[in-house]
Amino acid sequence: MIPALFKRVIVLHKPYKGRIVIALLAMAVTAAAEPVIPFFFQLLLDYGFQDGVDFPYWYVPAIVIGLFVVRGCATFTSTYMLTWVSSRFLTVIRQQMFDRMLDMSAGYFESYSVGRILNTIMFEVRQIINMVTDILTSIVRSFLTVVGLLAWLFYLNWKLSLITLVLLPLTSLVIRYTGRRLKKLNQETLALNNALTQELEESTRAHLVTKVFDAQEFERKRFARGTEEIRRYTMRTTRTFASTVPITQLMTACAVAVIVLIALYQFRHGQITVGSFVSFLTAMLMLLAPMKDLAQANGPLQRGLAAAEAVFDLIDAPIERTNGITLDRRATGQIEFANVSFSYPGSSGYALKDINLHIKPGETIALVGMSGGGKTTMVNLLPEFYAPSSGQILLDGISIQEISLSSLRKQIAMVSQHVVLFNDTVAANVAYGDMNPDMSRIEAAVKAAHLSGVVAGLEDGLQTNIGHNGLRLSGGQRQRLAIARAIYKDAPVLILDEATSALDTESEREVQAALDELMKGRTTLVIAHRLSTVEGASRIVVLAGGEIVEIGTHEELLKKDGVYAGLYKLPSSEFVESLHISQ
């Protein structure tokens, strides 16, 4: 029975069935050419070297060359068509995985490492391609060749051919036994590759941390352990896989030895001619290669099935919702949290409990509280990175779950302390997501973010490539570039998640002025550790244990002498620490 995963792979190849049929026909021609070779030897030995047989000598090279020209053209056609199909399939399946990844919920990335996702998209999908290619070439072409050669063998001598049939059930038993073990070993090897890719990604991203903590030797040993573990599993797989071939060849050799012995007996009793014997022996020896290919196809098949499981798990991963209305106007920025509670998947407790908060258009709300209070969780619910476990969030009186995610997120800009920039130009990073960027708006955003002087000093100005995650810029410059991106978007709702945390004093003054300008007329939620930002907010919301414990202006909360006043009375460094980002 064909595994369900393999059936699904076949279905995905359906759009290319025309080229696959051409490839199969070319394989059939190649396979059909195989029995012609021993047939030609029979004719040559039985008639070409006999007295009284007269034919033009040029027939021999013409037939030989013509046969191999036809065979070569068929082989080229099948190889070219299969490569075209496999490369197209690889492109399409990778695009499907990437599209799926973009639409996955935030929770998926908490359950699966970046290394595993990268390994699936870049490495494991190649195993499927190898499986399909080897299945078509090794099984289809080799199977047709075996059938053709067996037919010729039975035509020549059915008694000797019966011995050949003993090979088939014995070979299938070997393949069946090794197949189960190969599948398990390949699944374990893929898991180890995922882990090693994750380690490599972490080491690359954290190279500065590795240096400053003098952890190079630690990373070397960790990487060496991973590669050694993969090597061990590779050798175990190779032992299992490689043993299949000599066992198959040994069974074939035994059959050939018996056949030669019987053929010699038949020849001495005049039952076969020299030509028939040579033709039969040639066909038997020609069976070795396709039989070997059939045995070897089991390895790529099991590797491909293990990889297909990982690939389809990614393609079938749940995505964010796709329903909802499209807002036909710019939102005013009125936000309401109505009895909102939220619990992270797999967690027994609530990160937020019964949150009720009404935010007026243009109001600035500062979220403060001890670490673990729920500040970041609260702002992550607004763009619906996560959906509330209960209650609802409303934008301009409409539940955000009734609004399409695309339309909802167009109303929101976000600047985080964890700046994410792209290996592209300054202009492309500012206008990220805009298919038709406006240079005048880009320049205005750069100016508002106090980056004009920085850009003027770059070699190619706005067209300067900033490197991976903006490594060619300083921390403050990267933060201001992220702010310029938010300014360019010009959304009515703004989320500032410790947006000035990475800035020095001078940069902070420049950026804070830009932020003050950016926040005018926009509904802003601020998670900050700067007293100036907290004091200047319209209202301050104090969170503790996932609940709102206090709401008011800076002066009102100080007069109340509650949680906020206690935080405010802490020494400056402790106050900053107490307001740090949390889930």
Image (cartoon, rainbow, N blue to C red):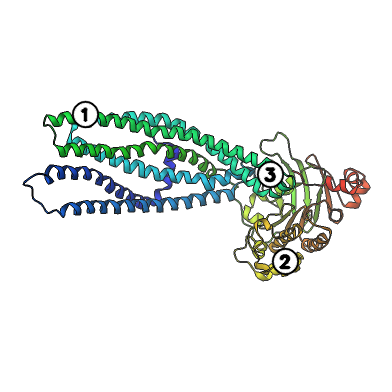
Q: Residues within 10 Å of mark 3 (few under 14, many from 20)?
A: some
User: Of label 3 and label 1, which has the lower sequence position?
Assistant: 3
* Dot in front, 2 or 3: 3
Q: Is residue 70 toward the left or the right of residue 273 in the image? A: right
Q: Is residue 312 toward the left or the right of residue 399 in the image? A: left
Q: Is residue 293 toward the left or the right of residue 347 in the image? A: left
- Going by the numbered disc 2, the residue's amino acid type is Val
The residue lying at 13 percent from left, 46 percent from top is 48
User: Can you give x and y, in whole percent of width and height, for residue 543 in the image?
Assistant: 81, 44
Taking depth in this image into account, of 540 and 438 the one nearest to the observer is 438
**Mark 3 lies on residue:** 216
Q: Quadrant of the N terminus?
A: top left
User: Can you give x and y, in whole percent of width and height, for residue 385 in the image?
Assistant: 66, 48
**Mark 2 lies on residue:** 446
User: Of label 2 and label 3, which has the lower sequence position?
Assistant: 3
Q: Residues within 10 Å of mark 1 (few under 14, many from 20)?
A: few
